[in-house]
Amino acid sequence: MGKSVIILSEDEIALVRESSLLVGRTLAEVARHIAPGITTGKLDAIAEEFIRDHGAVPGFKGLYGCPSTLLTSVNEQVVHGLPDDRPLQDGDIASVDCGVLMNGFYGDSAYTFCVGEVASETSELLHATRECLALGIEQAVEHNRTGDIGFAIQQHAERKGYGVVRELVGHGVGRKLHEAPEVPNYGKRGHGVRLKSGMALAIEPMINMGVKEVKQMSDGWTVVTKDGKPSAHFEHTVVVRAGKAEVLSTFQYIEDVLEKKGELITKG
Ligand code: MG
Ligand code: MG
């Protein structure tokens, strides 16, 4: 992660927006295919083909040794799950995290999907995590600090009795997938790095139904909740502006697909 915060020009922001929109369209392809019986490995192949067909390259693949285009985290998996040959089951939730690199700039976004019918307490967790993301984005305005984002997310999640993951955080986005600053999903108002117009940030609450503690599996990638309860993850790439952040990625393409499938359970 670079040390100094990068301020993007409007031309550069436009490129991050293009990459971020392609992530949204890629996740909509995932939305089209996700169902009980499909494997995360198959979803990964679909996503990679879609990204390459659009003149971009998968943003994660090869980065830090990542073997895949998507990171797919099912149920108690928080983030960084690796696509595999296990079919998704009715009642699962799957966080699908995707990055693309196009024209030298990254976009990064994640959405937690329901597979078939999920328990109502699980859909409540997804809904609350969406709210956390929206509340975090509200704070991504000039002169605020990263702690304002984290505080808003943490407050909302903990008020509902959920655990906020500490070990993994949001980040700057630009010519590298992970730029400064770190954007924790917890924090204190008025603390942290000061936000400036033109900073692109990935805001990505990871909210656990149970305890906040997580552990890493022996594959060196997959992070799971310590208590085995489900975890949700939604992420947008945004750019800090005066007054109101601009969201560069979008869930609209995903939601159009889910709505048609009758599977839309939470909206931002
Ligand atoms: Mg991501
Ligand atoms: Mg990210």
Image (tube, rainbow, N blue to C red):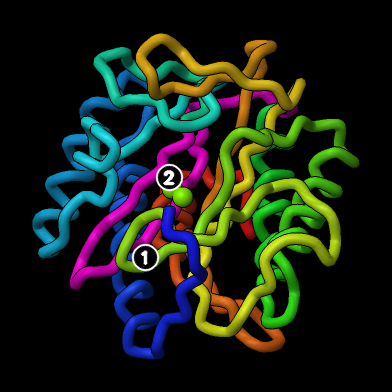
Q: Which residue is mark 1?
A: 20
The percent position of residue 45, horizontal first and vertical second, equals 17, 36
In this rendering, does residue 67 appear at all? yes
Q: Is residue 232 above or below residue 222?
A: below
Q: Which residues are magenta?
A: 95-121
Question: Where is residue 210 drawn, in percent x and y?
Answer: 76, 21
Helix, strand or loop at label 1? It is helix
* Amino acid identity at mark 2: Lys
| Front residue (pair 185, 121) | 185
Extreme residue toward the right, this view: 159
Which mark, by number, is residue 261?
2
What percent of the width, then of the height, locates residue 259? 48, 52
Query: Total of numbered circles in the picture?
Result: 2
Say left or right for 63 vs 137: left
Q: Nearer the viewer, residue 27 or 264?
A: 27
As for residue 106 lying within the magenta part, the answer is yes
Magenta span contains residue 100 = yes
- Say which residue appears at 49% left-offset and 38% top-offset: 113
Q: Secondary structure at mark 2?
A: helix
